[in-house]
Image (tube, rainbow, N blue to C red):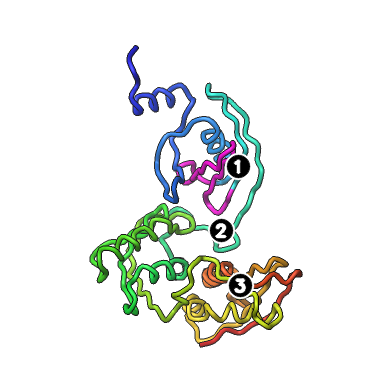
Amino acid sequence: MRAFTPVALGVALLVLGCATSARVRRDGRVHSGVVTGGARLSIERASREIPCRREDLVVEDLGSGGYRVVGCGSVMTYTCLGNGFGGGVCELNERRYPERDLAPPVHRGDTWTDGQVRELRATIHDEIMRCVPEGTDSVRLQLALSPRGEVRRIGRSQVDAAAGRCIDDALSRAQMLGTASEQRVVVMDFQRTQSVAAAPAAVTPMPATVPVGPDGAARAAVDTRAPSILACVEAEAIAMQVSWTAEGRLDVLLRGDRQGTPEESCVRAIVQQLTIPAPGAAGTIVHAVQR
């Protein structure tokens, strides 16, 4: 019997309706390919439930029949069971809109805005500076932002080969929110003084021995990111409402006419990475960040 090549098998499955082309997140990267079974079912259901083009959706296999579909500001989690013949069932487990809270969606026809570029810079700043050798205080990168939101380095950068590979790997995990009509090229400057460069992880908890209450711990945690926060709003000082959960995770809202803006989205992306020792109860304060 003649064996099918992977390409021929994929084409055959597409013709039979047992597979569909999709963007797939695997090993921290997004690939284009053909999906079958539960992954196909989850993409097809999400395309009916999310106001988003199918080609803008990304599916991720969570294991044990679980699938996460992300696109256009929505995150849908399903448990799907395919029968191998194009049929099966798919049950919705969770529906979230984290990107809707962070920033207004970008519609086709728009270009990437300056506010979204600042938000991207704040999000990737720490990872970029961790790639740069000690003793280098700043680095300038020329980045291309694709219509689908992928970020890649272009042109010549004043970094060595090892740092370049590290930066490229960090950028491969970055993603703009939404879509745009065309590519935009930007130049970004990253400075070591604008972040706590020694932070080893994305979530930066305060030491459990800090002799202050949750309000003091929250103020101290936010102040560690003051330069990056002020870079988001391009101001010397900013007042904000800082809140924490009973588990110690922080969140923030800006005040006045900055509410719901890309600047607020940029600040929230930074503060939501911070934690304080679990206080056991939620709380809220008004805090001023300044240089």
Secondary structure under the numbered disc 2 in the rendered image: helix
The boundaries of the magenta stretch are: 52-75
Name the quadrant containing residue 167.
Answer: bottom left
Q: Residues within 10 Å of mark 3 (few under 14, many from 20)?
A: few
Q: Which mark is residue 83?
A: none
Q: CA distance from mark 2 to mark 1?
A: 16 Å
Q: Which one is in front, 134 or 32? A: 134
Residue 105 drawn above or below residue 5: below
Secondary structure under the numbered disc 1 in the rendered image: helix
Magenta segment: does it hold 162? no
Return the residue at label 1: 49
Q: Which mark is residue 259?
A: 3
- Most extreme residue toward the right, as rendered? 281
Q: Amino acid at mark 2?
A: Glu
Across and down, in percent, residue 252 comes to 62, 72
Return the residue at label 2: 99
Q: Residue at x 35, y 24 (%)?
A: 8
